[in-house]
Image (tube, rainbow, N blue to C red):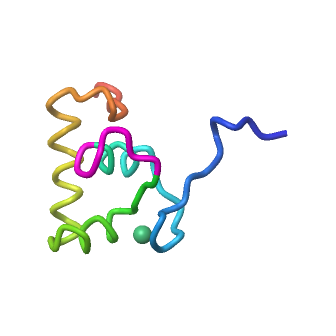
Amino acid sequence: MQADLNQTLLCSKCGTPISSDEIAVTRKLINRGAREFYCVSCLAEWFEVRPEDILERIEYFRASGCTLFEARSPE
Ligand SMILES: [Zn+2]
């Protein structure tokens, strides 16, 4: 039996399974209370930027200590 918390969320636009970082960046970029989430490529399309730019934002938010993003384990 699968726990609900581990249910895989899908991109609301293209149906790709999305990561916790993508959920977090959707919240940061679109709406903190967002209930629909998007993958990096759909976010890039939405904001008319490159997917790399979205990934950079994820790293930026993580580096700034945003609690929505999973911390990388220390080296
Ligand atoms: Zn998508």
Residue with the most extreme right position: 1
Residue 18 drawn at (x, y percent): 48, 56
Q: Which residues are magenta?
A: 28-35
48 over 19 or under it: above or below:
below
The answer to which quarter of the image holds residue 44 is: bottom left
On the picture, is 58 further left or further right than 34?
left
User: In what quadrant of the picture does the C terminus appear?
Assistant: top left
Q: How many numbered marks, from 0 up? A: 0
14 over 2 or under it: above or below:
below
Please check the rendered image and state whether residue 51 is part of the magenta-colored stretch, yes or no: no
The answer to which quarter of the image holds residue 53 is: bottom left
Q: Residue at x 17, y 34 (%)?
A: 63
The answer to which quarter of the image holds residue 27 is: top left
Q: Quadrant of ligand 1?
A: bottom left
Residue 19 drawn at (x, y percent): 46, 51
On the picture, is 70 further left or further right than 56?
right
Q: Residue at x 16, y 74 (%)?
A: 48
On the picture, is 74 further left or further right than 57?
right
User: In what quadrant of the picture does the N terminus appear?
Assistant: top right
Q: Residue at x 26, y 51 (%)?
A: 30
Residue 66 drawn at (x, y percent): 24, 29
User: Foreground: 61 or 43?
Assistant: 43
Residue 40 drawn at (x, y percent): 33, 63
User: Foreground: 15 or 52?
Assistant: 15
Dominant secondary structure of the residues highlighted in magenta in the image: loop
Q: Residue at x 48, y 64 (%)?
A: 12
